[in-house]
Every structure is written in C-alpha cells, then in structure tokens.
Amino acid sequence: MRVLVLGSLRSGGLNEALAATVEREAAGMADVVRFAGLERLPLYTTDLDAEGVHDQVDRLRREVRAADAVAIVTPEHNAMPSAAVKNALDLASRPLGDAPLAGKPVAVMSASPTPGGGRRAIAALLAGLGSARAVPVEATVSVPAAHERRDGEGGYDAAVGADVRAALTALAGATALATA
C-alpha cells in the first residue's frame, strides 16, 4: 500500500513529528510518500481548472492519484485544519468528475498542545472529506498535550504509535475494499 502524507508546514513542529511517526509506524505495512510543497500551492479557484495546467497543482493531483490512500496530518488553527491543508483538499477534490481524491481512503490526524488534541480540526476535515467524495476511515489520531508526548527521536510515544498503526490498518482495510 502506498500512502501519501499531506500535512504540516512547520519544521520541527508537533504535526511534523506526527508525520514522522506515520513514516516510522508504516515500516513493513506501507510505503509512505510525503507531499512537499503545500506552501507553494496556489489558492483554489475554479479559474485554476479553466486555465489548465499549474505545475504544483498537477503534481499534487498526480501524487494523490498514485497513492492507494492518504493520511492528512494537520495542526488545528482556530478550531479548523490549517489553511494549507484545506486548500490541498480543495485542489485534490477537483476537477469535478475527475477528482483524484474521490473514492480514496483517507485517515485524519492532528497533534496539538491543547487538551483537545486537534479534534475540532479532525471533525471539520471529516465533514469536508465526505463532501469531496473521499472515503474517510473511522480510525483518527488525536494527540492532546502533544508537546509532552514526544519520544526524543522526532516522533511520539508508544501510545501514539499504536493509534497511528490502527489508522494505517484501517487505511489498508479500506484500500483492500476499494480495489476488490
């Protein structure tokens, strides 16, 4: 299974560590590819589809298409996913009728220093993914008080690792169903 990770822009941040945990926990279960360049994507408008080719948008859409599943790792900003992640979702859910995200299994994850662990961002993304015709898996990963749960090796503690493995297992199951 090939999993595309979309997510955090902040080097060394809490969600960067969560993306690193996805990579570590996927060993032997999935090939992980991280999308680099969310910050270079233009803001979505229908004009982008009318204009045609945009290198960064085309690359995002190609990478989503090539993946068997997607793991979205987002910080929570004002009770929502980051603007960069929301924009990537908008771009990958277009053009209508040929959206690379449609039918794609997706796991949503968030790490936050707050007690909520990014749950509001996760809920917002799950709603948006349904509208985008993606297939969100039930297993989500929420890491509350994330700054206290780092493992010293760029990732998170064993409990977070177990939650990430559960999400990856759910993605593998959804991928198997999608290709059956």
Image: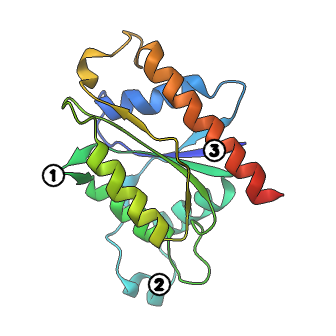
Q: Position of residue 177 (x, y in %)?
A: 76, 54
Residue at 36% over, 35% down: 142
Query: Which secondary structure, mark 1?
Result: loop
Q: Classify mark 3: helix, strand or loop.
A: helix
Q: Position of residue 44 (x, y in %)?
A: 35, 74
Q: Spatial distance from mark 1 to mark 3, Cα to Cα?
A: 28 Å
Does any portion of residue 39 appear in the rendered image? Answer: no
- Mark 2–mark 1 distance (CA, rounded to whole Å): 29 Å
| Quarter-of-image position of residue 76 | top left
Q: Which residue is mark 1?
A: 78
Three-letter residue code for mark 2: Asp
Say which residue label 3 marks: 171
Identify which residue is drawn at 66% across, 24% down.
27
Query: What's under tag 3, amino acid-wise?
Result: Leu
Q: Residues within 10 Å of mark 1 (few under 14, many from 20)?
A: few
Given this view, does label 2 or label 3 mark the residue nearer the observer? 3
- Specify the farthest residue to the bottom: 50
> Between 162 and 48, which is closer to the camera in this rendering?
162
Residue 49's disc is 2
Instruction: State the quadrant of the C terminus.
Output: bottom right
